[in-house]
């Protein structure tokens, strides 16, 4: 397991960080901020890096942007009974994009305060997505998971069937996409999230749904008896997305799913280990 930090700061307000980046020869990107507003520097650094402690101290001192992410080795993934499926390739927007965020046409029981919902019908697109080499994709604004038709066929051929398929429709013609379709688990876990001390929890005053903060650091812990042992695909009972009006359920998959994906070298996804506790 490797924990990486994506750091961003302005050279005008965080000169100590700029000096450290240069002193430690940290690979970074720079971009000028319009209006003589300084230079934005961004870089990634692992907590295993030699200079992490000093960088961490300066990041906290200056209040720099600090986004954390966890990466697992293939060995760790293949040893895990269950994993979170993360779609890494985002492209396009659900249509009609001018109104979808405030009035998503394919949701019902949509809470305008916290963003929880139930999907009742298909997403719409303006044109076929550019998949390039990717087998999976998602939208920028929505957590739905889409895959190529051949991926869906391989899942079913392998005996992984606990999901529904929903056509992705062209907004103008109403015809299904020729490239991809949505897959959605047909089952959910029982309540089983074991929250860490730093995890935030909030209850929506409007719909009373509870949301948890995004899980980014380390292993997610979950009750073993909340996940059927014979399941291959599930949605989490819990909602995530504290601090935003976006809400989503985690997408859990079995070791069998992960092995198939790795064997087929499906691009556009990665896995995060779930620790099952009794």
Image: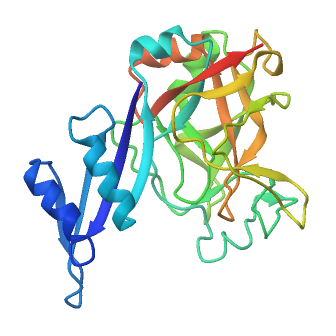
Residue at the image position 29 percent from the left and 66 percent from the top: 9
* Quarter of the picture holding the C terminus: top right
Please identify the residue farthest to the bottom as the structure is shown: 35
Residue at the image position 20 percent from the left and 70 percent from the top: 15
- Above or below: residue 129 compared with residue 274: below
* Quarter of the picture holding the N terminus: top left
- Above or below: residue 37 compared with residue 98: below
Along the horizontal axis of the image, is 29 left or right of 169? Answer: left
Provide residue 89's location: percent of width, then percent of height.
Answer: 43, 45
Question: Can I make out residue 147 in this image?
Answer: yes
Provide residue 178's location: percent of width, then percent of height.
Answer: 52, 43
Along the horizontal axis of the image, is 232 left or right of 119? Answer: left
Nearer to us in this view, 140 or 123: 140
Provide residue 118's location: percent of width, then percent of height.
Answer: 82, 51
Provide residue 25's location: percent of width, then percent of height.
Answer: 9, 48
Nearer to us in this view, 57 or 177: 57
Question: Can I make out residue 119 in this image?
Answer: no
| Image quadrant assignment for residue 197 | top right
How many numbered marks are there? Answer: 0
Residue at the image position 58 percent from the left and 60 percent from the top: 141
Along the horizontal axis of the image, is 99 left or right of 36? Answer: right
Residue at the image position 8 percent from the left and 53 percent from the top: 23
Nearer to us in this view, 265 or 189: 189
Colour option used: rainbow
């Amino acid at each position: 397991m490797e924990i990486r930090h994506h750091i961003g700061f302005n050279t005008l307000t965080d000169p100590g960080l700029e000096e450290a980046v240069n002193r430690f020869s940290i690979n970074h990107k720079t971009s000028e901020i319009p209006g003589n507003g300084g230079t934005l520097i961004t870089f990634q650094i692992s907590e295993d890096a030699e200079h992490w402690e000093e960088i961490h101290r300066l990041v906290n001192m200056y209040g720099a942007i600090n986004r954390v992410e966890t990466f697992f080795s293939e060995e760790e993934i293949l040893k895990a009974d269950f994993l979170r499926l993360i779609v890494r390739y985002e492209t396009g927007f659900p249509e009609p994009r001018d109104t979808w965020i405030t009035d998503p046409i394919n949701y019902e029981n949509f809470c305008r305060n916290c963003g929880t919902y139930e999907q009742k019908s298909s997403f719409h697109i303006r044109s076929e997505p550019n998949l390039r080499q990717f087998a999976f994709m998602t939208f920028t604004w929505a957590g739905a998971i889409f895959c190529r038709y051949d991926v869906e066929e391989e899942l079913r051929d392998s005996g992984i069937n606990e999901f529904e398929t929903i056509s992705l429709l062209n907004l103008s013609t109403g015809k299904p996409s020729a490239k991809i379709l949505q897959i959605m688990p047909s089952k959910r876990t029982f309540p089983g999230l074991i929250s860490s001390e730093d995890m935030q929890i909030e209850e929506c005053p409007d719909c009373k749904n509870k949301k948890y903060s995004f899980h980014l650091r380390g292993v997610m812990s979950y009750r073993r008896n909340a996940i059927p042992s014979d399941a291959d695909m599930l949605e989490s009972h819990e909602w995530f997305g504290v601090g935003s009006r976006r809400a989503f359920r985690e997408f859990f998959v079995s070791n069998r799913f992960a092995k198939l994906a790795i064997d087929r070298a499906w691009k556009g996804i990665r896995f995060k280990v779930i620790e099952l506790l009794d």
